Image: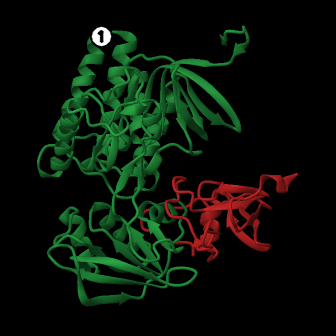
Amino acid sequence: MRIEDHPILNFNRNRRITFYYNGREIEAWEGETVAAALHAAGVRKLKKSLHHDRPRGFFCAIGNCSSCLMVVDGEPNVKTCVTEVEEGMVVEEQCGKGDLRAEM
Amino acid sequence: MWRNSAGRVICVQRCDMAVVGGGPAGLASVIKAAELGVERIMLLERDEFLGGQLVKQTHKFFGARDEYAGMRGIEIAEHFQERIDELSAIEVKKGAVAQGFYEDDVLGYTHQGRFKKLDPERLLLATGASEKMLTFANNDLPGVYGAGAVQTLMNQYGIIPGEKVLMIGGGNIGLIVAYQLLQADVGVAGVVEAESGIGGYSVHATKIRRCGIPLYTEHTIIRAEGEEEVEGAVIQKLDDDWQPVEGAEKRLDVDTICLAVGLAPIVDLAIQAGCEMAYIPEFGGDVPWRDEDMRTSHEAVFVAGDAAGVEEATAAILEGELAACAMARDLLGEKSEIMEEKTRARDKLNVLREGPVGDEIRSGLERMRRDIDAGEDRYSHQSRA
């Protein structure tokens, strides 16, 4: 959920964009990160853990912890907490380590 | 341009001073160095914006004698950005990730998908810190966030982390973020603190109490509940030896658990560069040893800010300035202006660390000197001869 009225801050929300999460259409504001936009849309589970398939979301939100890795436009292991969302971007939940050859 | 032994040209950019990290320490440092006359300064920032964690700090800074007192972190970041724009000696590379500092004193970094090489006369590591985890059942569930992550989500992007949050840690960060959650109209189920008293400043604790938020001192979290994401939390009372008291469990109905249990310095580059390290609990973990000018055991490498020991932004700014003065002296000689600025920065740091608030930092500084004298370096096998 987005904050509309804050006692101190104003948020720059100028341009609406649309991206895709597991095939689902999601609206976001330009300038938001993928993880932030997903969170605003109620998606907190971003990937599965490597060995036990445990659900994982972001933890640090500044690109340190790698808990938010997803497949973005076919590229695995993208840190979605520091990647700005773009119009038409295709974002998918990541299972395992990702396969670079899948792009060939 | 360099040539290797086979005569092939290697592209290495030269500069007088390189800074890794565009947070308070790095920004203050490039500005001070440029003001003192250092010319080719390169600032590498991995994010697409400058300011580091200042950009999400909506609270006003303390400190009567410091020029940034009364300003909010977000305003300080804007102030630094404007000053950098005025100083032509500073080249800023955003989205640039430092990868390593090698035996030939070359700094490698990636920028716009390419690996680039930089040969700085002096290097400052101002890489900041990362949030610590806490051990409890299901601590990996989505909805368990670091306090900084909650600030990023809320204060930078205007997105609330959840409907109801449990804050773990009653230090200043826990208290400040709990209050910021209330400002954003998010419910706070309580602040959990293992110690018998609240560790943060009483001014922050009072604000939280006044809003009717319970402060669970002598408690810890033992479990997060939920299958796919956080749906609740269980806390437990601790006895005087920090052991859980049987039967004294309490379940809280929350969808988010926020951990404010400290930070650890990000020191990978320093270790890799072969800097002598010291384990200083008061500083949050392993830090490069440094002298009183912020110089590490490597003559060309300096460290400042949380990477030198977790403290707060005002100290980071002053350490950045101090390091800038020392680097400027190396590069330009012992000019009186440089030496005066260096003394000024060090005096202000000492004033900041006076009194009970600076106890931990002073004890950490003492421990660092002692351990290094005793040759206690967990990474010394990596040091260069």
Point 50% across, 21% down: residue: B105
Q: How would you rate the neighbour count of disc 1 (Cα within 10 Å): few for under 14, some for 14-19, many for 20 or more?
A: few
Q: Residue A7, image x and y in percent? A: 42, 68
Residue B2 vertical placement versus B107 (above, below): above
Q: Is residue A74 left or right of residue B162?
A: right
Q: Residue B368, image x and y in percent? A: 23, 38
Q: Is residue B2 left or right of residue B25?
A: right
Q: Is residue A15 visible?
A: no
* Residue beneath disc 1: B335
Task: Please give the letter of the chain rendered in green.
Answer: B
Point 34% across, 71% down: residue: B168
Q: Which shade is chain A? A: red
Q: How is the image coloured?
A: by chain
Displayed quadrant of residue B44: top right
Q: How many marks?
A: 1
Point 34% across, 32% down: residue: B276
Q: Is residue B78 left or right of residue B285?
A: right
Amino acid type of the residue tagged 1 in the rendering: Lys
Q: Is residue B208 left or right of residue B40?
A: left
Q: Nearer the viewer, residue B305 or B55?
A: B305
Q: Residue B91, image x and y in percent? A: 56, 27
Displayed quadrant of residue B133: bottom left
* Image quadrant occupied by the N terminus of chain B: top right
Say which element carries label 1. loop
Q: Chain of mark 1?
A: B
Q: Is residue B378 visible?
A: yes
Point 36% across, 89% down: residue: B251
Residue B178 vertical placement versus B275 (above, below): below
Q: Residue B235, image x and y in percent? A: 32, 82
Residue A9 vertical placement versus B144 (above, below): above
Q: Nearer the viewer, residue B277 or B43?
A: B277
